[in-house]
Amino acid sequence: LHKEGEKLITTHCSYCGMQCGMHIRVSEKTGKVLGVEPRYDWPVTNGKLCPKGVTAYQQIDHKDRIKRPLIKRNTTFVESSWDEALDLIADKFSELQKKYGKDTLSVFGGVSMTNEKCYLVGKYARAALGTRFIDYNGRFCMSSAAGGFLSTFGIDRGSTLPWTELEHSDCFLIAGSNTAECHPTSIQWFWKARDKGAKMIVVDPRETPTARIADVHLDLKPGTDSALANGLLHLLIKEDYVDERYVMERCNNYKELKASVDPFTPVVTSEITGVSEEKIIQAAHMYGKSPRSVVMFARGVEQQSKGVDNVTLYTALALVRGQVGNFASGVATFTGQGNGQGGREHGQKSDLLPGYRKLTDPDAVKYISKVWGIEPEEMPKPGVSAFEMFDEIQAGNIRAMHVICSNPAVSAPNTEYVWDSFKKLDFLVVNDFFLSETAEFADVVLPAASWAEDEGTTTNLEGRVIHIRKVSEPLYESKPDWVILSEIAKRMGKGKHFPYENSREIFEELRLAAKGGNADYYGITYDRIDQEDGVFWPCPSEDHPGTPTMFKETFSTLDGKANLPAVTWEKAGEIPSEEFPHILTTGRVVFHYLSGNQTRRINFLMEQCPLPYAEIHPELASQYNVQNGETIKLTTPRNTMDLEVKLTKAIRKDTIFVPYHWGKKLAVNQLTNPCLDPISRMPEFKVCAVKMEKL
Ligand code: SF4
């Protein structure tokens, strides 16, 4: 496909968990990145790319790239040398630790980076800085899925089956995922299955492009997923769709589940969820009759203060039907960030070490300390979750933060509290390749190399570890994050623990650190990834084939059985009241990625979707005499913002939807509720009470 004078470098898109295969066109003469070509031989996406993917290469040589380190002097950023910036960071970190103790420093990581970098962020926090305060933006993304899978299956692998089997499924129950916009290249698999007669049930308060192609759309009230899932379970049991043998042999807690779903008759479920009884019954029969079904969900279900309950209940739908561990059936979550799966496995979570080992397990601490070359006593204790780190700043316990590949000034809930927390810090360091809203608060900004300027691995939404190839040398004076962290570690006197020359050396250490852990990568090598189109973890040895299908014979719990939940429905953390009578929910659009720090700089994407807006049903709008295109003020107990109205019948009459990809006064997260799930510590982005006024 490539022209004379060009070479094609095979890699993957930088954005969502699909990690679509692509070739980047590079000039042989200048090394300049010229464009993108589809990669038809990549089995998961077969050459498909979405609008973000086809323009991702435009980030690389973008005029907004941070070219040199920046130090803030009298409120203005001034370019500096690397030595000056790194020395300043090490001096300041040391000074603060001397005065206030080790835990005065904190690290806020991200998962839009390779496994090697994610692994090193955890090691940097614990072995170089010696702080217990580390967490990451996956807390706002995948944590409820992780909590649900751990309690049900004993292991947090986001999909129990490979995507290439989806075309052979007979029924998809998709809850809280606008797949067509957020993971567009997945849709081909549904179409292929539908050509063979497969059914689709979509659960969503909005009639999204995904819901539009469903056989049944369950348009539930935000915050009522547990009631709906309990209602569907009630019907599966009552109508005799349960695979009794599978449940008896492979699951615990069925009696308790049966008792807890008993009150959720169609009448009760309909009353709570707002979905008609007929549709609930139709969906239960459609799902119950399908011999090979897949339950899939995403942030709509997970970003709630009952996110873990929701995940366990939707997962139970697959278990009672005996669908987990079989061909073309099972459970999957759509990973939001590119490395949302791998990035959570190797030590960025406040309570976890590499390989999903627990920090509270003395043997795990001993093992990882040995791999890192530190004493077990030096290993910091567990810290707190991402949003709770801002509480620690407010309390004066954290005085400095290093943010790496993340933009919590946009993506955290109740953002004004987060902005105020950043202002309270004595010192903030940010690594990024564009000046994000978070970076604007920083004292020092370090120019990180972009995704295409370094080699490494990521783990896609299937659990397949893949190879991200280096497309070009880091532009300007940027450096890969692992180089930056190693340089700071050296200046903090911990250089001997960070001796790396390249990403492959870090991966070798990661393999060892993950060996025997819950997320075992030991058998995965770069060569195998290239030869086998990626390798699925768990993969404990080099002669192990990897694990595309999970739980064929046993689950990863202590007794080998899956744990069915027995949880009822509870109201969201904040429900409509007289003062705030409607429900606000947030989400994504196809043209933007997460906080928008990258996609808001791509002209084509901005032309399609330049600003946030409020999607409102015409009947709700008429109560306020609001027309399409007019401006309204939305207010929640936390904040207020103005938005243009988009009238649509594709949303519930009690719900307002706003996409979240913008910062500052355009950030809808100014309004969202930081009420946390008790297990996953996931904030409730998907439900809060809101009032609306015409301007
Ligand atoms: Fe594929 Fe996601 Fe990239 Fe779109 S954003 S091309 S779906 S990886």
Image (cartoon, rainbow, N blue to C red):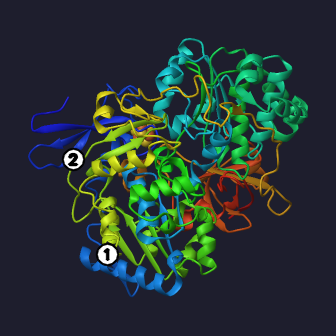
Q: Quadrant of the N terminus?
A: top left
Could you tell me which residue is drawn at 50 percent across and 18 percent down? 192
- From the Cβ of disc 2, is ligand 1 less than 8 Å away? no
Q: What element does badge 1 sit on?
A: helix
Residue 17 visible: yes
- Percent of width and height locating residue 365: 52, 57
Residue 597 visible: no
- From the Cβ of disc 1, is ligand 1 less than 8 Å away? no
Left or right: where 104 falls relative to 495: right
Residue at the spot of label 1: 491
160 or 540: nearer the eye? 540
Left or right: where 682 falls relative to 622: left
- Percent of width and height locating residue 49: 39, 34
Above or below, 606 against 185 in this view is below
Left or right: where 56 falls relative to 181: left
Left or right: where 9 falls relative to 460: left
238 or 694: nearer the eye? 238
- Percent of width and height locating residue 20: 39, 35
| Mark closer to the chain start, 1 or 2 | 2
Q: Give the amino acid type for the residue marked by disc 2 in the picture.
A: Val
Q: Quadrant of the C terminus?
A: bottom right
Q: Give the amino acid type for the residue marked by disc 1 in the picture.
A: Arg
Q: CA distance from mark 1 to mark 2?
A: 34 Å
Above or below, 229 against 599 in this view is above
195 or 442: nearer the eye? 442
Could you tell me which residue is drawn at 54 percent across and 23 percent down? 190
Q: Which numbered marker is on residue 33?
A: 2
Which tag is nearer the camera, tag 1 or tag 2?
A: 1
Above or below, 306 against 200 in this view is below
